[in-house]
Image: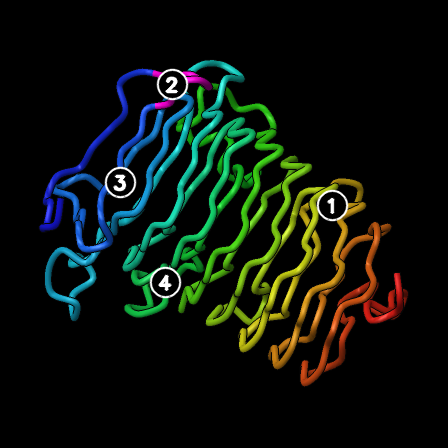
Amino acid sequence: MSGVYRQDFVTKRDGTLVSPITITGPRDALVKGESNGRVIEINHDNIILDGFTIDGLHGDDNLQDGYRDKLIYAQGKGQHDGVNGLKILNMTIKNAGGECVRLRYYAQNNEIAYNTITSCGRHDYKFDDGGKNGEGVYIGTAPEQRDDGKNPTNDNDESNGNWIHHNFFDTQGNECVDIKENSKYNIVENNECTGQKDPESGGLDSRGGYNIFRYNNIYGNSGAGIRLGGDTVDENIMNEVYENIIVNNKKGGIKIMTAPQGKMCDNIMSGNDGGNAVGEYGEDYDPTKGC
């Protein structure tokens, strides 16, 4: 029901494919959290969040500690057993100190769709806290974070097969969607992405391989429209980028830092500073050619 809810919550058990656990409410039901850095923590499978608002601004908007750090944080607790079957649907997700949504450690086959995700990364991008944290949706674990003790093991994080679609992003922080090394076969489609503020990255970013970016509208970002490139040359390969609208981005249309990449064609592009294809391998690709 409508109202302001100043509680955090953490899942306690799995749902099933046939009978998922659904947490739902109207758009004017505002969950602001209580005292934890994570407003909602998902540790179990087959959970649905639907319809309500998560607003990380719980105090003074002129103070850094007025913002919760992470708004939705999904991480499995078993070895090589991440969160599966999570659906985040029809939500308003806004005002995160760090990431708005994080899928971490073997998070597979999850869906994030029909959400409005705005004002992420307030700590770094509003208060100049020294980092570049502030993704709309962050998938996986960066290599330098694998040994931080937060994952059940320090293996490569294979957060694969997630579907991110029909969302509106205006992060005013970092990437709308950021896919980390070793995370593959994710599909990012039919999203609107703007307001990214890191000139070294992009509106959408893949540091893993074999991910698909298609049918997105990407515009007005401080970095490239899409960035492809990871920590190792052989890791970030064979991503597909096709039938996107990519316009008016400050560091190029598609920034290609590793090769070979996969299908890259039929993108509508204009007004991207530096050109449509930039980066170390940009000259090898014409992303506007017909498929």
**Is residue 202 within the magenta segment?**
no
Q: Is residue 15 left or right of residue 127?
A: right
Which numbered dot is residue 38?
A: 3
Q: Nearer the viewer, mark 2 or mark 3?
A: 2
Q: Residues within 10 Å of mark 4 (few under 14, many from 20)?
A: many
Q: Residues within 10 Å of mark 2 (few under 14, many from 20)?
A: few
Image vertical order of residue 176 relative to residue 113, above or below:
below
Range covered by the magenta-colored residues = 14-20
Q: Please, what is the three-letter code of the amino acid marked with disc 2?
A: Ser
Q: CA distance from mark 2 to mark 4?
A: 31 Å
The answer to whether mark 3 and mark 4 are in CB contact below 8 A is no
The tag earlier along the polypeptide, 3 or 4, is: 3
- Expressed as whole percent of the image width and height from the top left, the position of residue 20 reads 38, 22
Image vertical order of residue 260 relative to residue 169, above or below:
above
The tag earlier along the polypeptide, 3 or 1, is: 3
Q: CA distance from mark 4 to mark 1?
A: 27 Å
The tag earlier along the polypeptide, 4 or 1, is: 4
Query: Which residue is tagged 4?
Result: 118
Residue at (62% x, 53% y) in the render:
189
- Expressed as whole percent of the image width and height from the top left, the position of residue 3 reads 9, 50
Which image quarter: residue 205?
Answer: bottom right
Query: Which residue is tagged 2?
Result: 19
Query: Which residue is tagged 1?
Result: 236
